[in-house]
Image (cartoon, rainbow, N blue to C red):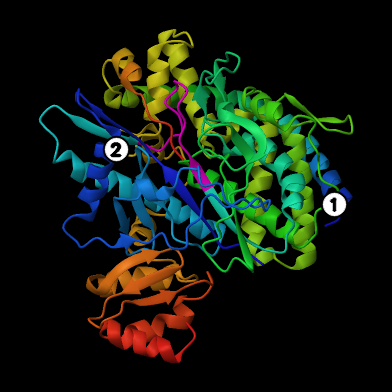
């Protein structure tokens, strides 16, 4: 069954010409500026447990809790969460019903940030300029995340996920990277590499996200009925700006996980040294680097991806899931074919090849060496979310990036929730009953309707709360009290 | 489609296309260079000033 999915992105933030720059303060300014004067709804942490481990180890109380950093928090009318995480503004998409929708809401996050930074700018002193980047590294050894979340059945053994998914995640870097000048975090020097994130991965499996980052993250915090579901928290991807790339990143992973869940993947590709392979693949933009398997075979990342593609195609054909995944398969095949022929031919669809084309253009025209600051500037500015300055946006405006969505479609994702998940209920309630909402969470809403006790509406089923199920009821209810009465009679 | 069949059809396709691709690539190469020069000029006009200073000061805290 197609996976409920979503993304969480931490954005880079900086203010030019501000000696007192404090990233936490700046991030708070961004979020508060976006929220404006509208009442803020408290994020409730009752059901959150980032320290729970999917391997069954229980809790580790020493782990940093999201609670400390959740002070500035906004729940948006599209069902998304906009907040300050550590020292970054973060946008978590609402729960989406398919990868195309998730890619659109991921892009909506960039629009939200662009609007937020423009408003925050008005609060700054003359000469100061705030910038927000959708990237994952400052080039100096500091990384921040772009996480993907996929809802899986609880009955999928975690060991199977590790065995089947590790090789997929390592090899998919050829189309998930957004490109980076140089290497960091103690990795061998390189002029340019495919991904922002590879240098920061040091373990195969683990619970950490801020240090010793693992290829497979074991955080077991489903934000849903934990007896039925797990949420696979994928932390190894890059934040991507290309719409095609975001769609392929999410769609191929959702499809492989779907096949895995249905037991449709044959023997896994088991890597001899997954962590080294992550670095090796990322550090070779010519795509010739081979990956060693434990059975002694070697293959390139592209060859591994062709293998996953064949398995996925077979699964789609046999399970009749063509409607859900046809577009994913055709995009996947086209990208692999073009990468194989000439990676430069994907510069209209992939961030890393688009960025590399710009860097090579400047190197040639201006005779720049790879260590020239101008190339690092181009690398950073590719990710600026301000459409007047972001180099991705300049490429897109020049018709050089393939688009999947119109700006209008993205603006509607900024305003309105997806219709197929509980995000619909959350977003509509925020829009219609904001005054009565005192707290919100992924899996509940808490209302104050003027009675003694607050009313909590649990939403433990991510596919419920959809427009089909609650649309009429929300339309009919003129007050939050009426909504709650009506909900009492129906299983939303 | 069976796995084997798809592999064959893919390699057959890529052989057919191979010859065309070489010519196309040469023509495309020239066009791309021309168009990228225009693009670089446009980017020159939006690129942050003082690259060295900007890159040096761009320091983020780790996250996640």
**Would residue A218 be visible to someone looking at this image?**
yes
The image shows residue A385, relative to residue A42, as above or below, that is above
Residue pictured at 46% horizontal, 67% vertical: A443
The image shows residue A402, relative to residue A423, as above or below, that is above
Residue density around tag 2, few if under 14, some if 14–19, many if 20 or more, within 10 Å:
some
Q: Determine which residue is flagged by label 1.
A: A266
Q: Is residue A139 magenta?
A: yes
Residue A4 is tagged as none
Q: Determine which residue is flagged by label 2.
A: A24
Q: Residue furthest bottom?
A: A489
Q: Is residue A322 left or right of residue B38?
A: right
Residue density around tag 1, few if under 14, some if 14–19, many if 20 or more, within 10 Å:
few
Q: Nearer the viewer, mark 2 or mark 1?
A: 2
Task: Please state the horizontal and vertical placement of residue B25, each as a whole percent of the image.
Answer: 62, 27
Residue A13: quadrant of the picture = top left
Of the pair A288 and A3, the residue shown nearer to us: A3
| Callout 2–callout 1 Cβ contact below 8 Å | no
The image shows residue A224, relative to residue A401, as above or below, that is below
Of the pair A478 and A358, the residue shown nearer to us: A478
Q: Is residue A50 magenta?
A: no
Task: Please state the horizontal and vertical placement of residue B49, each as a whole percent of the image.
Answer: 26, 18
Residue pictured at 41% horizontal, 35% vertical: A392
Q: Which residues are magenta?
A: A133-147
Q: Is residue A166 left or right of residue A112?
A: right
Magenta part, dominant SS: loop
Residue pictured at 27% horizontal, 76% vertical: A448
Q: Classify the position of the N terminus of chain A by image quarter.
A: bottom right
Task: Please state the horizontal and vertical placement of residue A198, each as a whole percent of the image.
Answer: 59, 30
Secondary structure of the residue carrying numbered label 1: loop
Secondary structure of the residue carrying numbered label 2: helix
The image shows residue B56, relative to residue A470, as above or below, that is above
Residue pictured at 57% horizontal, 26% vertical: A199
């Amino acid at each position: 069954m197609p996976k409920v999915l979503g993304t969480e992105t931490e954005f880079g933030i900086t203010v030019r010409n501000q000696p007192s720059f404090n990233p936490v303060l700046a991030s708070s300014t961004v979020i508060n500026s976006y929220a404006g004067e509208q009442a803020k709804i408290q994020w409730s942490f009752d059901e959150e447990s980032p320290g729970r481990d999917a391997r069954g180890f229980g809790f580790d109380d020493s782990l940093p809790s999201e609670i400390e950093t959740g002070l500035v928090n906004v729940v948006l009318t599209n069902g998304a969460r906009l907040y300050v995480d550590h020292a970054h503004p973060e946008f978590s998409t609402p729960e989406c019903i398919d990868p195309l929708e998730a890619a659109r809401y991921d892009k909506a996050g960039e629009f939200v940030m662009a609007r937020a930074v423009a408003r925050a700018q008005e609060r700054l002193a003359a000469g100061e300029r705030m910038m927000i980047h959708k990237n994952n590294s400052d080039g100096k050894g500091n990384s921040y995340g772009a996480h993907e979340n996929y809802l899986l059945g609880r009955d999928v053994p975690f060991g199977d996920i590790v065995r089947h998914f590790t090789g997929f995640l390592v090899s998919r870097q050829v189309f998930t990277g957004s490109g980076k000048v140089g290497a960091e975090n103690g990795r061998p020097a390189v002029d340019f590499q495919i991904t922002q994130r590879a240098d920061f991965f040091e373990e195969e499996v683990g619970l950490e996200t801020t240090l010793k980052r693992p290829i497979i993250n074991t955080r077991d915090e489903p934000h849903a009925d934990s007896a039925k579901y797990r949420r696979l928290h994928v932390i190894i991807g890059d934040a991507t700006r290309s719409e095609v790339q975001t769609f392929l990143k999410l769609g191929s992973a959702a499809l492989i996980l779907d096949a895995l869940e249905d037991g449709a993947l044959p023997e896994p590709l088991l890597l001899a040294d997954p962590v080294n392979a992550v670095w090796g693949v990322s550090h070779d933009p010519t795509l010739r680097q081979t990956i060693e398997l434990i059975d002694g075979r070697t293959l390139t990342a592209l060859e591994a991806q062709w293998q996953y593609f064949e398995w996925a195609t077979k699964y789609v054909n046999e399970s009749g899931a063509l409607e859900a995944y046809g577009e994913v398969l055709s995009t996947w095949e086209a990208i692999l074919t073009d990468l194989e022929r000439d990676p430069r031919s994907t510069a209209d669809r992939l961030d890393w090849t688009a960025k590399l084309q710009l860097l090579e253009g400047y190197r040639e025209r201006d005779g720049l060496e790879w260590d020239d600051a101008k190339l690092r500037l181009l690398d950073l500015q590719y990710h600026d979310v301000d459409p007047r300055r972001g180099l991705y946006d300049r490429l897109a405006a020049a018709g050089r990036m393939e688009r999947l969505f119109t700006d209008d479609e993205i603006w509607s994702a900024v305003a309105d929730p997806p219709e197929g998940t509980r995000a619909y209920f959350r977003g509509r309630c925020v829009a219609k009953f904001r005054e009565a909402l005192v707290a919100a969470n992924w899996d509940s809403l808490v209302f104050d309707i003027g009675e003694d006790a607050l009313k909590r509406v649990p939403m433990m089923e991510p596919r419920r709360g959809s427009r089909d199920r609650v649309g009429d009821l929300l339309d009919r209810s003129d007050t939050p009290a009426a909504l709650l009465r009506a909900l009492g009679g129906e299983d939303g | 489609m069976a796995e084997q069949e798809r592999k064959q059809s893919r390699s057959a396709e890529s052989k057919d296309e191979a010859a065309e691709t070489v010519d196309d690539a040469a023509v495309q190469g020239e066009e791309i260079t021309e168009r990228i020069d225009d693009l670089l000029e446009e980017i020159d006009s939006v690129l942050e000033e003082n690259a060295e200073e900007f890159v040096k000061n761009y320091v983020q805290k780790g996250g996640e």
